Image (cartoon, rainbow, N blue to C red):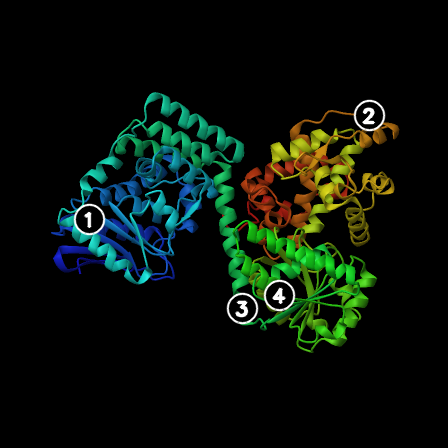
Amino acid sequence: MLFQSNNIQLVELEQQIGELILNAQGSVNKFDKETLEAFRCAIEKAQQSQLKALVLTSTKPAFIVGADITEFLDKFALPQTELLSWIKYATDIFDALEDLPFPTVSAINGYALGGGCETILATDFRIADTQARIGLPEVKLGIMPGFGGTVRMSRLLGADNAMELITTGKELKAADALKLSLVDAVVEPEILREAAIDCAVQAANGQFNWQQRRQQKLSALSLNKTENAMSFALAKSMVMQKAGSHYPAPLKAVETIEQGSKLARDDAMRIENENFVELTQTPQAQALVGLFLADQQVKSLAKSAKKLAAPVQTAAVLGAGIMGGGIAYQAASRQHKVILKDINANALDLGMQEAAKLLNKAASMGKISAEQAAQSLIRIQPTLEHNALKPADIVVEAVVENANVKAKVLAETEQTISDHAVLATNTSTISIDLLAQDLQRPANFCGMHFFNPVHKMPLVEVIRGSKTSEQTIATVVEFAKKMGKTPIVVNDCPGFFVNRVLFPYLAAFNQLMFDGADLATVDKVMEKRFGWPMGPAYLLDVIGLDTAFHAQSVMAKGFPTRMPMPSDNLLKVLVDAQRLGQKSGSGFYRYELDNKGKLQKRPDDYIATHLQQAGVVQQTFNEQQIIDRLMMPMINECILCLEQGIVASAEEADMALIYGLGFPPFRGGVFRYLQQLGLKSYITRAKSYEHLGPAYQLSDSLLDKAKSNLQFLATK
């Protein structure tokens, strides 16, 4: 044994071949502070040894999953000079690996991501098993590779290939990595270590010119002036089209490769270090890292449900419309048997057609095979018979959003299914306790709120009623997780969490319009400046104005003070005119099919004319005023939901808004956004809007936290 630590061992094999074994105490290998230091010591020992070659192997299912992201925010908070010193210290470790006086080989099993990918880039040869996944996903965290990834990958693969992989954060399968020469060979997992050692022996014996390979990574890129200009100009243009100005990391990565392209490794590495530190100071990096940590927290909570959950072999869906068909598809595509029940044969056909359409689309895109699509469809059993529900372990009711209809269907269903079966309602606004009033087993009942379209939206709100058992919650959480969704448990109230905080935002939009704002300008500001995927008017058209109006009525009944039905109500105006949004061809906007059959949004003066006739005088609001007017009611309602225990933590609230509403990820969710604004700064600004009504009133919880310099989030 040449070196031994808790996470890494260095041993000498036959023929003076060294093996650096990545063997973390935890479930995965990752570069936390302790492991990085052990890695440095192991490389130092190898450098001082009489070894003729070195092989890097892993005892874990993955090679190295990357750096320890839980340490990032603390690192980013360091003084910039100290952070720059640390990143150079880390980079020097990988340079030392690359500079060892003998050939090096990586034996890549499973994931080699981020720092793991940068490790293999520093070795002379890379052999992967067939299950390997390799990539540099740092841009997804608002940063870029910091351990030499931009320098080494661009020299190994060429600038164009490197920029595509780094700016997209794309993971490559082993076969694709081989095509790009990111790895030198792909072998079956059982012979990976043997193949890597054999490669090292041959390189040590002079059969492979490892020195020439290494020199390529130490030298400047070989691009002439024209190639250089075209390559980087095109890359910047593509990055701006895809990422836009809200995500600076991809563009900075391109600039880093460009700035270092004419320099040897050490000088190029200095540029990477400096640009990496610059990105860590952006609000986007803080938000996206915080978002990753919040996502891990939510997944950990969902994972803990498995111990208590009852097994679900067969699921049933009541109501075979678009939503019911989508839920059936989602469950069947994840290996569940599904009973799809409706009282109307035409509706049943519609639900099956929806499921078939989604499965065929997945097959045409290569996500599943045609055989898998057919098998999934076979797993869905359409029926008009109520008794067919008897085998179900869980029943998801997805009938019309009407409390009386739902309550009747749920009560009838409870009489049919087994005593142990879970009954869940896919309601978006109606109180769970209200729907549970006529049930004999309310402990087995909860809400399971899917978002539309089901196959695209990752969130499922699992709503706990006052009599819902913990096993019921755990069962539904586990079922949602197995369906490929992110479940977040919330407590019961009208609208639950996501819709409860959405409607003050939409009410604020209505109020702003009657105060004279321009509809198109508001949508543009909220999309382009704030970062929502759709502005409020466009969002309402997509939801459907009749659906939104109905939900608005439910919310007004539930929160008459904070969300009263407005006397001047654009939703009612549009519904009365049968302008229901995209589904009717007009709402706030007009909708027409283009030459490719795709629905396109067109300007429409209907609302402007109505407002003018109502005596509204158009006014100009600046971008910040528009953002404040719309976002403050949502922020305030989120704080109330946390204060009232509707949602358990700020982290879960942020993830619910990201996954359920498409809240801009680069802002990290409402509470991360609030933290970046600063509570005291937000309070000062918010006080100037308090005259607009209860939705703009500040929570006592917010004021108390600001006085005590506390935060809502557990992370900085």
Label 3 – label 2 distance at C-alpha: 58 Å
Residue 423 image point, x, y percent: 70, 69
Q: Secondary structure at mark 4?
A: helix
The residue that mark 2 highlights is 617
* Of marks 4 and 2, the one in the foreground: 4
Alpha carbon separation for disc pair 4 and 3: 27 Å
Q: Which residue is mark 3?
A: 306
From mark 1 to mark 3, how far is it between C-alphas?
44 Å
Q: Is residue 218 above or below residue 302?
A: above
Q: Amino acid at mark 1?
A: Glu
Give the side of residue 436 with respect to residue 162, left or right. Answer: right
Label 2 close to label 1 by CB (< 8 Å): no
Q: Is residue 567 left or right of residue 414?
A: right
Q: CA distance from mark 2 to mark 1?
A: 74 Å
Q: Amino acid at mark 3?
A: Lys
Real-space Cα separation, disc 4 to disc 1, in angstroms: 59 Å
Name the foreground residue: 28 vs 262: 262
Q: Which residue is mark 1?
A: 44
Image quadrant for the N terminus?
bottom left
Locate residue 430: give its quadrant: bottom right
Q: Residue at x 80, y 71 (%)?
A: 438
